[in-house]
Amino acid sequence: MTHTKHGEPRKDVVRTYVEKDVAGLKDPHITLVRSLMGRKNKKVAEHVVCLANVLASENMGISYLTQSSEFVILLIEVMKAEKTDSKLRQNALGTLQKLSLHRLPQAIMIEGGCVEWITETLRKESETLSDYTFEYSTALLMNLALRTAGKIRCENEQLGIVKVLLDHIEHESLQVKTYINGTLYSLLTRPVIKEQAKGYGMEEMIQHMLGTADEQIEKQLRYILVQLQSEETEECLSDNNEDPLDFEDDEGYETENEEEVDEDIKNSGYPVGEELLQEFAEGEAIPSEYMSPQVHLYKSSVSSSSVCLLYTSPSPRDLSTSRMPSSACKKKKKKK
């Protein structure tokens, strides 16, 4: 998919994958995906999640992936199980972020502890996180904080989400700052969180930042300041179609080149594509942590003649509307 041109050529590939149910998501137990993800050699799982990440860059792909709640749960489990900022974790995170604008996956992610995981990750790993993880984790957090259930999760003072957000509010990345500002604006509709923010001296901090912020960030900060000082507590961002923050489409956002990441995979010494799946066909028992209670999988019975050729790809990291804040997505759709 990453070797096809954007637009109709890529959409044709996605359409074919969706029509043929390439990941077997119509199976309520997602047996195929669980089997592929259950290898001790994580490269198979990594490439499967890479494929999901690219699929999630297209609307058809999002609709396909979100039909299975079990798949969303599996992505959460994979992301949380990885203890390092690996490619597997990055692609699981990226896929979840792209699915997080849909209410059912959003609710599953909130219930699955994604708010808590992101907060802990930003607190404990901020010095070693890749730009990718920083950007996608803060974007996912902002999307989850749009929901009342997400806000309630953030009210736990022991979680310390306000402190974590304030620690990174001056991050060097414009995208990260925008996502953090969006999260804070949303959360400040909750009186408990507003009191926590005041306790950390947030008003003074923002007043100080206004002197050096660029025009876009200054506008966001002023909205946050108004929200912080307001007595109103309605859930404006949870239900309204628009929010006041100026989340502009950033067509100039620089990302890691897809081809560069693809070359990293190719030069890693691991098999890829058909060779990778043929090696997988020799099979091993599936680790229990990747098995649902209803499904028991044993040694793979896939024969080499029935191996499906999956073209592996890195995380797309593209500028599609699916990875943007909800307000930006809605604004962009109106232009069509």
Image (cartoon, rainbow, N blue to C red):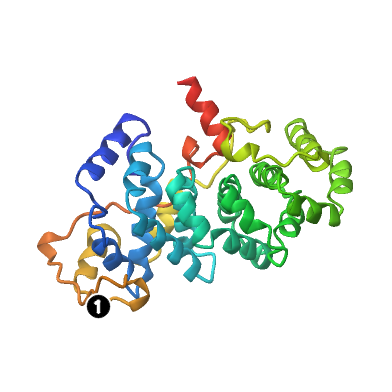
Q: Which kind of residue does numbered mark 1 sit on?
A: Glu
Instruction: Give how far across and how far down residue 57 sits, in percent.
Output: 41, 42
Apparent side of residue 292 relative to residue 195 in the rendered image (left or right): left
Residue 4 makes an appearance in the image: yes
Single out the residue that lies furthest toward the left: 305
Q: Position of residue 265 (x, y in %)?
A: 40, 59
Quadrant in the picture for residue 285:
bottom left
Q: Looking at the image, which residue is at 36% across and 45% down? A: 55
Q: Is residue 335 above or below residue 23?
A: above
Instruction: Residue 68 in the image: state x and y as whole percent.
Output: 33, 53
* 332 in relation to 51, above or below: above
So how many labels did they put on this image?
A: 1
Q: Residue at x 41, y 50 (%)?
A: 53
Name the quarter where the N terminus is drawn. Answer: top left
How many C-alpha atoms fall within 10 Å of the one at disc 1: few (<14), some, or many (≥20)? some
Q: Residue furthest top?
A: 335
Q: Secondary structure at mark 1?
A: loop
Look at the image and tell me in which quarter the C terminus lies.
top left
Give residue 219's quadrant in the image. Answer: top right
Query: Does 130 appear above or below 330?
Result: below
Residue 24 lies left or right of residue 77; in this view the side is left
Q: Say which of 256 and 206 sits in front.
A: 206
Query: Is residue 89 placed above or below 140 in the rendered structure?
Result: below
Q: Position of residue 213 (x, y in %)?
A: 80, 38
- Residue, x 22% and y 59% (percent of image)? 274
- Specify whether residue 251 is in view: no
In-front residue for pair 59/46: 59
Please give the residue where the numbered disc 1 appears in the rendered image: 284
At 19% across and 72% down in the image, what residue appears? 300
